[in-house]
Image (cartoon, helix red, strand yellow):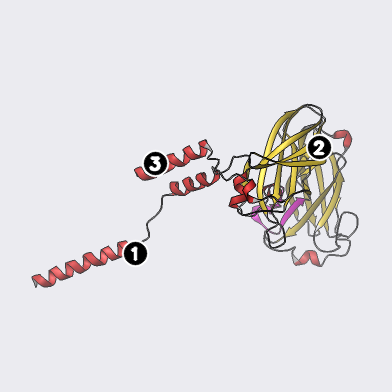
Amino acid sequence: MKIMNTLLGSALVLAASAATAAEPAIRPLGLDAADLYREQARYPRSSQALRDGVDPILNKRQINKQFMAGPNGEGPMLSIWNSAISYEPGEKVQLFAELVKDTAVKPIDLLRKLEKKSQNLTVTAKLVGETSGLMGEVTYRDNGKGADRRAGDGIYSASFTMPKARAPQAGYAESVAVHVQAQTSQGEFRGALGGFLYSNPGARLTGRYRDEMRDGNMVVSAEVNVIAPGRYHLAATMDSGKGADGAQPMAWAQNAAVLQPGKQWIDLTYYGLIFHDMAAAGPYTMSSITLTSALSIPNAMTSVQRNVYSMPVHEMSAFQARPFNNPLLMDAAQRLEADAQAK
């Protein structure tokens, strides 16, 4: 019996050890964050590799729909959106609205049965500037005319031209709220609040670009015409031509400078190591670029310009391959690793 108890005890110990060994070790989250910091530290903050293939400039300009349900969360919901997030003096704002059962479905069947002129649903909006007040009122239509693209599809459309006489001072922007009200033929009311920026940029890109290799990095310069003195921010995404569709965002660069009126150049430096890490020998295209007036909050934004400049192919040996080792990020990574080891 004593031998049997000893064997049983040993078996239990071995089973427990096996179960423990089978369980994967939980890696501290701090080490994951440290790895991320070390990866980001390979490049300066002003020039980053785009490993996910997402253009950060276009991503920030994506349109987000706003949804508002009825009393006590009742459906259908009123969804509204604009064609852009910022408009300049004289530009036409495209406004859209629809009723949906939820955020994942198309317009409800009721709207598909409306008459061609969509008289069973009334949608209106007031455009109100944060400082300048009421700018105008619009009525949305679903009749396939004017701003509306297709009659009877349940998407109501309206347009509004931004009045030049109400434009902000050059280099400044104003937030504009869009107060939308909708009423069905059954007397149901829905309301939603959207908005956009009314931007009057203080500088614009002239369309002239140039590039050169400098210390193993590719430097692309853009000419700007400055109207109002102040601080300006330039950002651009470079494609490598490696994607399935012939274009793949590979690098992003930015620069900010205080500029005086007149034409002058702003440099964008694409760090050489990026070209090695992304195995991108070219050709290269400036696929998106935008200039922002950073004179106040909110910033005045220009529209994104696409595929504006092509750069020559360079031998990979022309690009330096040294990690930048951003000291702030490296220090943060070391502290996270030390904290994880101490626990």
- Residue range in magenta is 60-82
* Residue at position x 82%, y 56% in the image: 156
107 horizontally vs 47: left or right: right
| Residue named by callout 1 | 22
Does residue 201 appear in the picture of this structure? no
Number of callouts in the render?
3
What is the quadrant of the N terminus in the image? bottom left
Q: In the rendered image of this protein, does residue 62 appear above or below residue 152?
A: above
The amino acid beneath tag 3 is: Ala
Of tags 1 and 3, the one toward the viewer is 3
Marked residue nearer the N-terminal end (1 or 3): 1
Q: Residues within 10 Å of mark 2 (few under 14, many from 20)?
A: some
| Residue named by callout 2 | 204
Q: Is residue 294 magenta?
A: no
Q: In the rendered image of this protein, does residue 63 appear above or below residue 264?
A: below
* Residue at position x 86%, y 49% in the image: 159
Closer to the camera, 342 or 128? 342
